[in-house]
Image (cartoon, grey):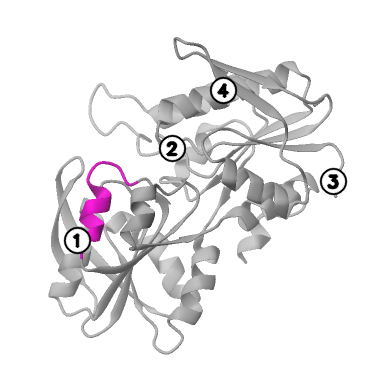
């Protein structure tokens, strides 16, 4: 289908890499990744990439540092093999929550990751639903920020065709994201006012909006420990919501997240495959996974042909 293009997949999510390559009607590039006995990463490109536009898929999910280092090594190998361009395709951008100095003498690690990738030799970045949009400005190379709401809405519209739900933002910072969903479905919007006492611990204070006897969908970019999500779901149920659902792009699911969701009032948690879902999460029966392979594949195709990527979301 294409000339001079190769799709490589790191070890973080080979299934998604295969799905993207299948959408593009291309084979997955031959890439060998090994580790020395002390943990050092070794990568070898097993095909000619001289003058080829290369796309490397690697969500920097758990173990975050291992996957970031692996991506850097693969990019360096491609650069030294004379690839024409190297695009880092990051369905999930690790360290995105460290996007500013929230306290004295702390790092801006999201910027550090950007510097590392740029120094390694990337030509472009593609990412899905960044935690903070300003991360695009940390790069001095083109950055395509994709939105998963199209993938979610294709699933939610027929599911709630009989009666529109209320879309709920779990905090003030997520209002813009949640409003985008409500606007596209012509649905109502509600906001949860919460006060965070310390990291990974949140307290729900109030619900702004009419959710009584309505189905509600909590919208967020990621689920980490699920404390915020489960507290929000409980508060909504206590204030009269009929059924509570959640839609979140990145299923990080660290620590007690799965157990919290299993024992919560949530009917269903809809996530994407930007991060591979663990076996425990699948077995919980609470999760429904949507694929972003078509979204990423179409973006790659448009980038390669110099077509508009933003028109995907119009």
Instruction: State the separation of the CA atoms marked 2 and 4.
Output: 14 Å
Disc number for residue 2: 3
Within 10 Å of disc 3 (Cα), the crowding (few <14, some 14-19, many 20+) is: few
Q: Which residue is mark 1?
A: 263
In the figure, is residue 108 to the left or right of 91?
left
The image quadrant where one finds the C terminus is bottom right
**Camera-nearest residue between 90 and 251:** 251
Do tag 4 and tag 3 residues touch (Cβ < 8 Å)? no
Q: Which residue is mark 2?
A: 61
Q: Earlier in the sequence, mark 4 or mark 3?
A: 3
**Disc number lying in front (2 or 4):** 2
Residue located beneath label 4 in the image:
72
Among the two numbered marks 1 and 3 on one chain, the one whose residue lies closer to the N terminus: 3
Q: Are marks 1 and 3 in contact (CB under 8 Å)?
A: no
| Disc nearest the viewer among 1 and 3 | 1
Crowd rating for badge 2 (residues with CA inside 10 Å; few <14, some 14–19, many 20+): many
Q: Is residue 205 above or below residue 304?
A: below
Q: Nearer the viewer, residue 238 or 22?
A: 22
Label 3 residue SS: loop
Segment colored magenta: 253-264
Q: Is residue 149 left or right of residue 106?
A: right
């Amino acid at each position: 289908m294409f000339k001079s293009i190769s799709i490589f997949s790191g070890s973080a999510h080979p299934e998604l890499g295969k799905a993207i390559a299948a959408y593009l009607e291309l084979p997955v590039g031959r890439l060998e990744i090994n580790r020395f006995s002390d943990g050092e990463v070794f990568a070898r490109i097993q095909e000619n990439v001289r003058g080829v536009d290369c796309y490397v898929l690697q969500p920097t999910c758990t173990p975050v540092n291992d996957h970031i280092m692996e991506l850097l090594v693969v990019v360096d190998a491609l650069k030294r093999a004379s690839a024409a361009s190297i695009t880092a395709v990051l369905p999930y951008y690790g360290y995105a929550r460290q996007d500013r100095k929230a306290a004295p003498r702390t790092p801006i690690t999201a910027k550090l990751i950007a510097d590392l990738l740029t120094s390694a030799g990337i030509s472009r970045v593609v990412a899905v639903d960044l935690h903070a949009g300003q991360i695009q400005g940390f790069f001095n190379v083109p950055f395509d920020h994709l939105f998963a709401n199209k993938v979610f809405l294709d699933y939610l519209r027929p599911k709630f065709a009989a009666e529109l739900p209320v879309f709920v933002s779990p905090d003030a910072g997520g209002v813009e994201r949640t409003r985008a969903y409500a606007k596209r479905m012509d649905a109502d919007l509600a906001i949860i006012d919460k006060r965070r006492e310390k990291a990974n611990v949140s307290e729900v204070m109030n619900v702004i909006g009419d959710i009584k006897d309505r189905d509600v969908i909590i919208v967020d970019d990621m689920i980490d420990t699920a404390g915020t999500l489960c507290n929000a779901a409980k508060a909504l149920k206590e204030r009269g919501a009929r059924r509570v659902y959640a839609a979140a792009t990145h299923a990080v699911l660290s620590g007690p997240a799965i157990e919290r969701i299993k024992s919560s009032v949530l009917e269903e948690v809809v996530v994407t495959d930007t991060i591979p879902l663990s076996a425990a999460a699948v077995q919980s029966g609470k999760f429904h996974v949507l694929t972003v392979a078509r979204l990423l594949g179409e973006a790659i195709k448009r980038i390669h042909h110099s077509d508009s990527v933003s028109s995907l979301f119009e």
